[in-house]
Amino acid sequence: QQQVKQSPQSLIVQKGGISIINCAYENTAFDYFPWYQQFPGKGPALLIAIRPDVSEKKEGRFTISFNKSAKQFSLHIMDSQPGDSATYFCAASPLESNTGKLIFGQGTTLQVKP
Amino acid sequence: DSGVTQTPKHLITATGQRVTLRCSPRSGDLSVYWYQQSLDQGLQFLIQYYNGEERAKGNILERFSAQQFPDLHSELNLSSLELGDSALYFCASSVGGREGSYEQYFGPGTRLTVT
């Protein structure tokens, strides 16, 4: 119940294309869903996050789509660039438990080809 | 730069030894989180402190312990080290608190190698 399942494990996209990464969860107590980007040798960096009271959030080229009934959420990267090549992690947190601890998906390695 | 600092950057030690990892949160953040990143387990939550008190515990081994000091920096102590403890250890911080922001900002990590 504490798991967050992420797919695909790896993704190759052409420059200018759309990258889509999906996550699914079981625990209905989760109420905060961030996405992190990690470059080799660096710590994860917060990209964008969503609460379950909205179905979509957009920041620049990054969009989170959220489907509460299906318990799924996804990250869309529009106009993907070689500089977007990194590992992406979805996460979920039961904020109501007053901790904010993050449960992470297994990660998706994105390669954007020039 | 997230504003979270971690030392040391790399640590190489032998099995059975004890090490201490240090984290300084972003200015103003009261919550500190520790995560372990390994190839087989991914990113796993270990423990959280809020304003000096333990707030949540994850899959943290009994050989591991942590604390948060009055100046809000935190230390993660790993003892009786095993080969399987080799991993990246990240610290993250957030404003925290029931009414505060839970956005977590990660440090650059400490790479621990146990030989």
Image (cartoon, rainbow, N blue to C red):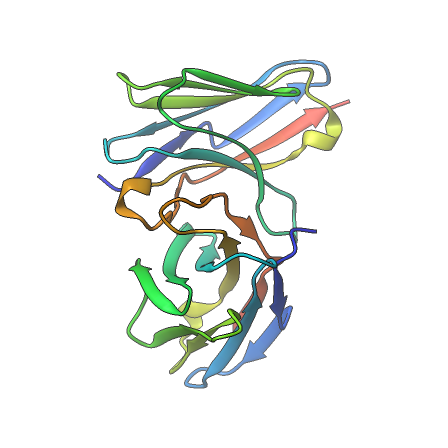
User: Furthest-right residue in view?
Assistant: A114
Tell me the quadrant of the picture where the N terminus of chain A can be found: top left
Q: Quadrant of residue B34?
A: bottom left
At horizontal 35% and vertical 47% (from top left) the residue drawn is B98
Residue sitting nearer the eye, B14 or B72 = B72
Q: Position of residue B38 (x, y in %)?
A: 47, 56
Q: Quadrant of residue A22?
A: top left
Q: Position of residue A56 (x, y in %)?
A: 47, 16
At horizontal 51% and vertical 69% (from top left) the residue drawn is B72
Residue sitting nearer the eye, B17 or A55 = A55
User: Furthest-bottom residue in view?
Assistant: B17
Q: Does residue B61 appear left or right of residue B85 in this picture? A: left
Q: How many marks?
A: 0
At horizontal 52% and vertical 59% (from top left) the residue drawn is B90
Q: Position of residue A102 (x, y in %)?
A: 39, 46
Tell me the quadrant of the picture where the C terminus of chain A can be found: top right
Q: Is residue B83 above or below residue B33?
A: below
Q: Is residue B29 above or below residue A82?
A: below
Residue sitting nearer the eye, B54 or A1 = B54
Question: Is residue A94 at least partly visible in the picture?
Answer: no
Question: Is residue A102 at least partly visible in the picture?
Answer: yes
User: Furthest-front residue in view?
Assistant: B99
Q: Quadrant of residue A67?
A: top left
Q: Does residue B62 appear left or right of residue A62 in this picture? A: left
Q: Is residue A49 above or below residue B107?
A: above
